[in-house]
Amino acid sequence: MNILTTSQKSNEAIQEEAKALASSMHMTYIKRGKTSIPALFGKYQCEYIAVLAGSGLTIHFPENQQHTFHLSMAQLRILRLQRGEGDHLINAVQVILDKKGLSNRDKFTFFDCTIGLGSDSIVVSYGYPQAQITGLEGSLPIWLATSHGLAHYIHSDDSVTNVLRRIKVNHDTFEHYLPNLPDNSIDIIYFDPMFEVPVEESPQFKPLRGHTVESHIEDKIMAQAMRVATYGVIIKERPFSSVFQNYPPHQWVGGKYSRIGYGIYMKELM
């Protein structure tokens, strides 16, 4: 059972919103009252509990961990873009657009197969306001937090709030979703799978340990991605990872010897 409830001091409007949200997400709404989160876990034996409050949606886990949407690294990356310092993912997207003879003002579709906390898609949405961005997230609790945050989080800068609203997220895995897409239906496809050899763990991921979906890019996935992509595919991984050994990129962004690399695969070269 997947439970959605409210904060203990919620008003009637929040409770009605929670009921509607639970129904739309096929979750069970539980009236909170004064019941504590540990008591709810003890009573319902569920994997996680989503709590709606005026401040947003928080996902609680039994191990006394919780997760709520926030801009995290996307905030710093946007600040760097504002200072003209650039961003590796933006540069990778631009490589593909340049090779297709497109400017950074041309419209294109961008499909984030592993949206996670949303940082990469947020940065692309900021860097390319004309891009139509769709993402996938296979973990239900992460999808709940990210999709709700993108739709409801209000930033102090209205332009950043608009960046979030332009991103749409589906709950699915790319292994299941990609084969059902038509040929040449998305301009750029992006993968950021869990690293084979992790970089030091970010604090924002600690509450989500054990609740992520670990997917791998294999031959059939790469073939599907290149079938669906109109322009090309971008993969983010450690430079020495097996995916880059199995599928040498046509071009690198970030450098072959940096901690993280963006491998670019052009459609016409595959």
Image (spheres, helix red, strand yellow):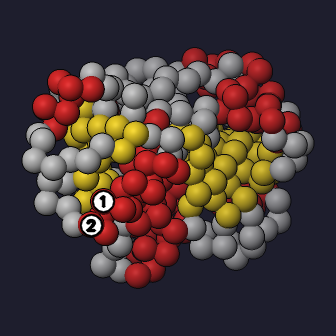
Asked if 155 appears above or below 244 in the picture, the reply is below
Q: Secondary structure at mark 2?
A: helix
- Residue contact between numbered discs 1 and 2, judged by CB atoms under 8 Å: yes
Q: Position of residue 268 (x, y in %)?
A: 88, 43
Quarter that holds the N terminus:
top left
Whole-angstrom CA distance, mark 1 to mark 2, is 5 Å
Quarter that holds the C terminus:
top right
Q: Left of 100 or right of it: where is 199?
A: left
Asked if 106 appears above or below 237 in the picture, the reply is below
> Callout 2: few (<14), some (14-19), or many (20+) C-alpha neighbours within 10 Å?
few
Q: Position of residue 100 (x, y in %)?
A: 82, 59
Q: Secondary structure at mark 1?
A: helix
Along the line of sight, which residue is nearer the eye, 59 or 168? Answer: 59
User: Which residue: 22% across, 66% down?
Assistant: 11
Q: Is residue 246 visible?
A: yes
- The amino acid type found where label 2 is placed reads Glu
Q: Position of residue 48 (x, y in %)?
A: 31, 32
Q: Is residue 206 visible?
A: no
**Residue 65: which quarter of the image?**
top left
Along the line of sight, which residue is nearer the eye, 39 or 65? Answer: 39
Asked if 4 appears above or below 193 in the picture, the reply is below
Asked if 120 appears above or below 204 in the picture, the reply is below
Q: Left of 175 or right of it: where is 58?
A: left
| Residue annotated with mark 1 | 15
- The amino acid type found where label 1 is placed reads Gln
| Residue annotated with mark 2 | 12
User: Which residue: 42% across, 74% down?
Assistant: 160
